[in-house]
Structures are given as C-alpha cells and as structure tokens.
Amino acid sequence: MSTTPSPSDAPPPSRIPLPEGTIPVAIGLLVAGVCSFAFFAVGKAALGSEEAFQPVISLWFATFALAPGFFLPLEQELGRALSARRAIGQGGRPVVLKVLTLGAVLAISTMVVIAALGPWLRSDYFDGSWVMVLALMVAIAAYAPTHLARGVCSGSGRFRSYAIVMGADGLVRIVLCVALAVVGVDAVGWYGLAVAVAPLLGVLAVASRGQLRVDPGPPATWAEVTPNLGWLLLGSVMAAGLVNAGPIATNLLADGSEEGLVTRFGYGVILARIPLFLFQAVQAALLPRLARLAASGQMDEFLQGFRRLMVLVAIVGVVGVTGAFAVGPIAVEIMYDSELSRRTLAVLALGSVFYMLGLAIAQAVIALHGHAMVALGWSVGMVSFVIATWLIGGEVFRRVELGLLAGSGSAMVVFALALRSRLRAGAVPTDGSVLEALTDMPLET
C-alpha cells in the first residue's frame, strides 16, 4: 500500500503555524504605541502649555524620522544574516561586528550633520533651544545600538527579548516623564533628554541577561551583510520621513505668531494613528503567515488571505475615519485639553489609512523580494508629499493634511502595482524575506 499522503491529508492553511516571534513583536509594538499617547498628555501637563511642550514634539518627530530611517535597515540585514547562519549551525559574531562598524559610521555621520546644522535647528526648529539639538544627537547615539540589539534578538530567535527592547522604549520614556513632572521639573530640555535616552534601558536589560551574546563563527564578508542594504536604507528613510513629516513640515511652515501649532498638529497625528498602531500589531502575526502560505506553494490561499487582509484594513480605515470625524475633537479635548477641527482629524485619519494599506502591501512585496520596488514606492510618496504641500495654498494645517494624503496615497498605488508585478513574475518568499517583512515596521513610537 502506498504511504504517499493524499491532498486531503495535508494540513489546512489555518493550521500552518505562525513564524516564531510574531506574537511577542506584536505585543512590544502595542505597548510602545500606548505609551506614546500617554507621553503626549503627561508632557504637556508637566510643562503647562502647548507652546512650552512644542520643542519636545519637534524632537519626537525628528527622532522617529531619522533613527528608524537610518538604523532599521541595519537591524533587518543583521537579523537576516544571523538567521541564515543559525539555520546552518554557524556562529554570527563576525556578522555582528561588521554591522556594528556600519552602525557606528552611520551614527557618527548623522550626528556630525546635526551638529553642523545646529545653529539653524536651534533657531528655526527648536525655538532657540541648544539642549534640544543635543538631545537629537543623543537620540541618534541611543537608537543606533537599540536597533542593532533588536537585529541580534530577531536573528537569534530571541523574540521575547526583541519585544522587551521595543516595549521598554515607550515604558521608560513615560516613567521618566512622570518622574520629572512629580519632582516639579519644568525645563523643557530634561523632557527632550528623556525621549533621547529612553531606549537604552531595554538594551541594557536584555544584555544583562546574556541575550545579546553571539557565538564565534566563520569570517563575514560585506556581501553577506549588505545585499539589500541600499534599497532598504532608501525605503526606510523615505517611509519614516513620510509618516513623521506632518509635524515637521508644520513647524517649518508656521510663522512666529502661530505658537503651539506644532503641538496641536502632533495631537492630531498621534490620534489618527490609533488604527495604524492596532493594525500593525495584528499585522505582525497575519502577514508573515500569508507569506508562509506562498512559500509552501499555496499561492491561491495566499491571495485569498491577502484579499481578506485588505478588506480588514478597509474596514478598520472606515471606522477610524468615521470615528475621527465624529468624536475626534472630543477626544483631543479630553486627552490633551486642546482643539482640532473635524476636517483636520478626518483627513489625517484617511492619510493613515492610505499609509496602513501601503505598509501592508509593501511588506508583502518585501516578502516577495521586491526591495527596490518598495524603496521606489516610499520615495514617490515622500516626493509627492513635498510637491503637494508646496503647491497647495491656504492655512498650514490644510496644506500639510492634504500633502500627507497625497504622499501616502501615491505610495500605496506604487506598492499595489509592484505586488501585482512580483506575483506575475512568480516570486516566492523565503524564510529570510519573511523575517525582513516581519521587521519592516517604519512606524516607530
């Protein structure tokens, strides 16, 4: 009698296990997101006004435009290379040393540029505060090892430690902010430094438990650690820049009589991201599973699952936009004791929906080895934002809102075309590309 299993003996798609680490990553992301909402409320209350809190808001969005943009690609490539070595029983210490060198060069170069731009940043961006310029440099120095630690954890299969590093960033930040408020500190620079140093405690915690140790192994070549680095770097910088561009552009476009404008716009951006935060946490589990379906040859099931995922995003988006229009102003008043119009909140929420759709599709494209296409999509989005914001007339909020809508929408369209192209070409995911898709989360908090 034949022992060959029949098609009916194969496990149904629903029983295909999630890739390791998806649940801890989702939890870490959700914790970091929740803490960011609390930080905005506590920080403003501690400093007493939106005008006083504005330099911290400016630092916040500049930090999360630069740090993930530059260092997330190093995290991804380190995780991929370590995972590949782990699969064949080789130690990854030489790989870590190579990426550490790249990270140090990139961090130092970024800090030098910030220092060179210091006088302009102090006067035109940070309301005359040199401490905020220093805090931005400290943030770069802190987030470089944070992302590399996350790369070691993901590539070594230590996803609980990965989640600790991610979640501790938000938790430490809010704890430091509350501590400063309790002791009565009202100097804005201390709150900026709290944002800057927050990620380091999580790194120290996992390092003290030996979770960053990597075994010796064969020498690593640059080709081993940088096959997709250029495309990943370009895409990551543009994606992180686009999702944080609103408050930055508002700061640069507002005149001196519009104090507190950046803080109020920051409230709108963070509230409009609620569906995006929640969906990213769920997506960390759903999208890699779909990629595994494709990797096992079940492309029909993959396409059906991906369509359901897009429907879920659309439903979340409709609820988010409707909620932003209906109760958004009330939420801003209750949470932050501030005011924003229904139009602003609804348009920001719609932009987040487009970004959410684009992010989901982009992760699928990365799983199908379309790194260059993803870099192109985020670049198109960023350029579209700049052009739209420049061409649109009227008040600052209106220009930036519609610019974000145009940027996210154009990126989404490029990704949709790229996904169709990769599927028609017969591209199939691998474990390495699945890991890159799982950790490709430009929305940092």
Image (cartoon, rainbow, N blue to C red):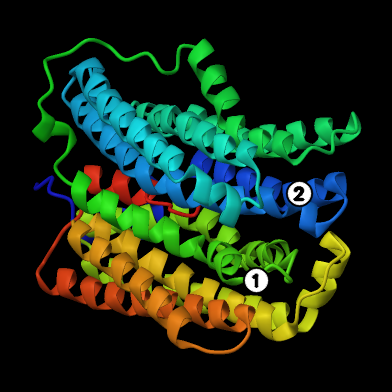
Image position, residue 94 (x, y; %) = 20, 17
Image position, residue 291 (x, y; %) = 29, 56
Residue that badge 1 annotates = 255
Give the side of residue 324 with respect to residue 142, left or right: right
> Is disc 2 surrounded by few (<14), some (14 to 19) or many (20+) residues within 10 Å?
some
Asked if 138 appears above or below 334 in the picture, the reply is above
Name which residue lies at 65% across and 61% down: 270
Name which residue lies at 72% across and 33% down: 190
Q: Looking at the picture, which amino acid does disc 1 mark? A: Asp
Q: Is residue 7 visible?
A: yes
Q: Looking at the picture, which amino acid does disc 2 mark? A: Ala
Give the side of residue 146 with respect to residue 154, left or right: right
Question: Looking at this view, is 87 or 126 the one in front?
Answer: 126
Asked if 91 appears above or below 180 in the picture, the reply is above
Name which residue lies at 19% across and 26% down: 85
Residue that badge 2 annotates = 38
Q: Earlier in the sequence, mark 1 or mark 2?
A: 2
